[in-house]
Each structure stands twice: as C-alpha cells, then as structure tokens.
Amino acid sequence: MTVKPEPIILSQNGGGGSASGEGIPIGRGGRPVDAREDLVGLPTGELERALLALGEKPYRGRQVAEWIYARGARDFAAMTNLPHPLRTKLDQHYRIGSLRETARRETPDRKTRKLALTIPGGGIVESVFMTTPKRYTFCLSAQHGCGFACRFCATGRMGRGRNLAAGEIVEQALRLRRELPPGTQDFNVVMMGMGEPLENYDAVIAALGILTAPAPGGLGLSPKRVTISTVGLVPQIVRLADEGHRYRLAISLHAATDEARSKLMPVNRTFPLASLIRAVTHHVETTGRRVTFEYILIEEINDSIGDAAKLVRLVAQLPCKINLIPYNPIGPGKFKRPSADRIQRFVDYLSPRVAAVTVRYSQGVEIGAACGQLAGVTGEAPR
Ligand code: SAH
C-alpha cells in the first residue's frame, strides 16, 4: 500500500483557519486545511450516498467501505477493484483519515506503544496499543483534553478541549490495527484514553457502531470486546442501557464515600454516589452484564482497610468486578502509589468479600502511556 505524502507546510505559525498568500487555508500548526471530507467514520449507507453523489452506483460505496474498514486502505490508489477515473475522482473530493502521527513512544519490548496523533485544527490526542499474554488491547481517546478535572489525572490538568469526531475515533483503531502482528485480527477496545467518552456520547456510539459492524461496513469487533469507561455521567449510563448497547461498562469510582470522592473527582458533586449506584444498577439489570469498578489506590487517601470496608458495602448488591489501579505518577503533586504491602492488604480484604478483584499494574508507565498519564506531550522526533 502506498503512503500518502504529508501535506506541504506552508507556514509554521498560521492562525486557526486563516488564509495564506495563495488563498490556501492554513490550520493551527501551520498546515493547509484539507477541505476534502473524511470518509473514515461514515457508515456504509452514507458511503453509498457519497458515491451516488459522484454519479456512481451504491455498490461502489460498499466497496469503499470494505477497503477502508475491512482492508485498512489508506488511500484511494489502493482500491484496485475501482476504475482508475473513479479513484481519481474520489481523491479529489474525499480523503481517508484526518490524523497525523507526529510522534510515538514504545517500551523496549514493543508491547506498549503510544501514538501521538495530531488532530485537524491542532492539538494532539494519544492512543495506546497494549499487548497482554492473552490479547491485544487498543486504548482510544474520546476527546482532546478533559473538563472533569479529576485530581489524579494528567488529562484532567489539560482542561476541556474538544470532542473528537466519530471518524477520529475510528481512525485511532484503524491505525492501532496496523500495529498487530501479521495474521492477527483479534483485539479489544477500551475507551480509556483522553477525555470522557460519555460526554461525547453520539460520536463515541457512532464510532463503536462502525468498529462492531460486520465486514464490509465495519471492523467486525464483538461488542463484548469493547469497554466504555466513565467518570460516572448518570444520564448517559441510563441512556446506554435503555438504547440496548451491549458494550461493557467501567466506572471510575476511586472512593466509596461522597466526601472522599468529591475531593478526588469534582463530578461527584453533580452525580453523587447514590445516583451513580442507581444508574449502574439499572445498567446491570437492563443489560444482564456485570460492571467493572475502577479504583485507583493512592497512599493514605483511599487505601486503608476502612476504605476497603466502605467499598465492599457500596457495591455489595451489584454483580461487579473491582479493578484496582495502583496510582501512576503524573508529575508534581501529593499523591503516591502505596507500597506493595499496602496494596496486598487491600486486595486480601476485598477478595473474599466481592465477586472478583483484579490489580491492574498499568503498562507503559515508563513511556507515559499508562492510565491517567495521557496529556498529549509525547515528545519525540516525528517519523
Ligand atoms: N474519563 C474516563 C476515561 C478515562 S479512563 C474515565 O475517567 O473513566 C482512564 C482510567 O485511568 C480511569 O479509570 C481513570 O480514573 C484512571 N486514572 C486516571 N489517572 C490515573 C493515575 N494517575 N493513575 C492510575 N489511574 C489513573
């Protein structure tokens, strides 16, 4: 497959959307704005309409869908079952993808790889490829920045950015799929990158619709292999259940009392624990799926046996798994990861009292790719 050349840099300091001397619009970061519509993220029906608009038969839209989603084509030249003039016409009107890989960091064993992807208009989102003994997992971002300001999270320090479009989310998965070893097709998706997926509900659901659509219109991923992680947006949790989505739900809990949780996660003042647990119960009852509670262990903040006892009481009625995440450092601050002994003590208390407990030692801490560390600062030479 041919790689599309990067657009020529016309100006290093072009302001958002301003025009260059030749009248070519320049985006933030000094790149020309590509006015062609991105086809990534469009469902097959819309691709059929796009091809109809070019005077083609709808089946051409299905062929394009297959090239983009099933075969991972990165340009129209690769679409060898389309007539040459059509490929040229498509290239004049449309593009495949909007993101640019501007940096990447990999662990020495290459099991964890963090891609820094520049979004149109400027800004970097990060996506992480993770290898575990049993599977490959793609960690995707839903927003650039995040407005929820969780005290322990690097993305939260960036402040609110913008929602990603469905295509920008799908494209992250398409790019990470290229990282799989040859012959491997299976992967999981976790919406645990930058941003709050349920605040960008429509785009996330549209993107996941394409990831889980069977070929040729999608990537053929089972909904069971998709996890949406949320700070706990109650209305959207209810909506997910009521709309019948079959994705797994993970709740970033991190504390078991309103007082403690509001200090760590300001969103708790809007949706306190009682309302959150009610929404999660509704989700569990409607979908028949157990829920995962994520709980960062922070020394002296939420890692005592008293905290563990409150956690057990809070989730007692729910079929759930508790995923403990030893705190990952994100620069200056008062939070610390507890010692291995303290972590073990917490686990030993929980294990006999809840259905399932796991400890997630995040991958990629050394390359800033672990939970909570994504802040769009992957600084390495572009490649
Ligand atoms: N906004 C969503 C998606 C981000 S998921 C959510 O909050 O669920 C990222 C996960 O990593 C969340 O559970 C988050 O709380 C956790 N996390 C954030 N900062 C962390 C840190 N410094 N160490 C460990 N986990 C962290």
Image (cartoon, rainbow, N blue to C red):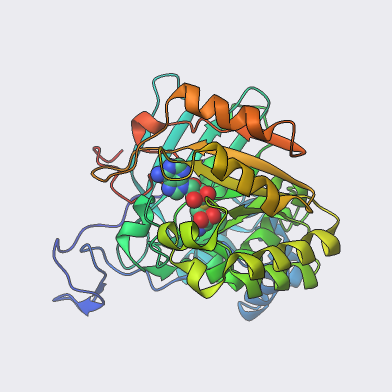
State which quadrant residue 301 falls in. top left
Q: Residue furthest front?
A: 306
Q: Mark yes or no: residue 76 visible.
A: no
State which quadrant residue 113 falls in. top left
Q: Residue furthest top?
A: 109
Q: Mark yes or no: residue 337 visible.
A: yes
Counting from the top left corner in percent of width and height, residue 107 is at 40, 25
- Compare residues 139 and 298 and report the one nearer the observer: 298
Q: Quadrant of the C terminus?
A: top left
Counting from the top left corner in percent of width and height, residue 370 is at 44, 38
Residue at 39% across, 20% down: 108
Counting from the top left corner in percent of width and height, residue 217 is at 73, 58
Residue at 72% across, 71% down: 238
Q: Is residue 35 left or right of residue 179?
A: left
- Compare residues 291 and 214 and report the one nearer the observer: 291
Q: Is residue 209 left or right of residue 174?
A: right
Give the mark count: 0
Counting from the top left corner in percent of width and height, residue 225 is at 72, 45
**Vertically, is 38 above or below 382?**
below
Q: Is residue 192 left or right of residue 31?
A: right
Residue at 59% across, 41% down: 308
State which quadrant residue 284 falls in. bottom right
**Vertically, is 295 above or below 144?**
above
Residue at 18% across, 63% down: 10
- Compare residues 295 and 299 and report the one nearer the observer: 299
**Vertically, is 124 above or below 120?**
above
